[in-house]
Image (cartoon, rainbow, N blue to C red):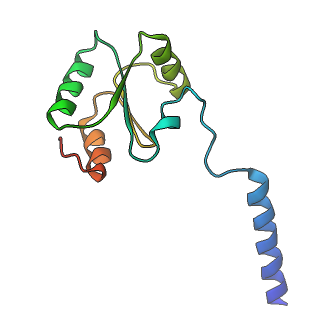
Amino acid sequence: MRILLLLGVLALAGVWAHARGPATPTLHPDDPRAGTGETGVVMLAAEWCGYCRRQQAEFASAKVRYRVLDIDTPQGARAMRAIGARGVPVTVIGQEVVRGYDTAALGRHLQPLGYRIY
């Protein structure tokens, strides 16, 4: 009897999980996470942003391989909207999003990729 109950619960759980759809959400094509995989780094920045320039200098000295999307270009503006960001810098590391000049979060997400900055 217990086995039948357990099998019924497991079957219902499987049906429910299948009906929910994929575990990972589908990203908008303009979302930078759509192209970063697990190790790519993209920084949404602006030339007029002092924190952006500071972070870029730190990335350069640590030899971080990354791509910059200028938010004052159409592509950068679309990326900002897709990710729901309102200010810069925004750094996408793999599938993680670091909002602002947050050195603790940047260091925490860059360290597994072999970068020691902060």
Residue most extreme to the left = 61
Q: Which one is nearer the viewer's eye here, 108 or 75?
A: 75
Considering the image in quadrants, where does the N terminus appear? bottom right
Q: Looking at the picture, how far across and down is residue 34, in whole percent?
A: 53, 36
Q: Does 25 sit above or below residue 79?
A: below
Q: What is the total number of numbered labels drawn onto the structure image?
A: 0
Q: Does 85 sit above or below residue 49?
A: below
> Left or right: where does residue 29 sit relative to residue 60?
right
Q: Looking at the picture, how far across and down is residue 90, in whole percent?
A: 38, 27
Going 18% across and 41% down the picture, which residue do you hit?
A: 117
> Left or right: where does residue 59 sit relative to residue 87?
left
> Left or right: where does residue 93 sit relative to residue 8?
left
Going 23% across and 27% down the picture, which residue do you hit?
A: 55
Going 74% across and 51% down the picture, which residue do you hit?
A: 20
Considering the image in quadrants, where does the C terminus appear? top left
Q: Which one is nearer the viewer's eye here, 45 or 11?
A: 45
Q: Does 80 sit above or below residue 102?
A: above
Q: Which one is nearer the viewer's eye here, 10 or 24?
A: 24
Q: Looking at the picture, how far across and down is residue 70, in whole percent?
A: 38, 16
Give the image quarter of residue 29: top right
Going 32% across and 46% down the picture, which residue do you hit?
A: 109
> Left or right: where does residue 40 sit relative to residue 24?
left
Residue most extreme to the bottom = 1
Q: Which one is nearer the viewer's eye here, 106 or 66?
A: 66
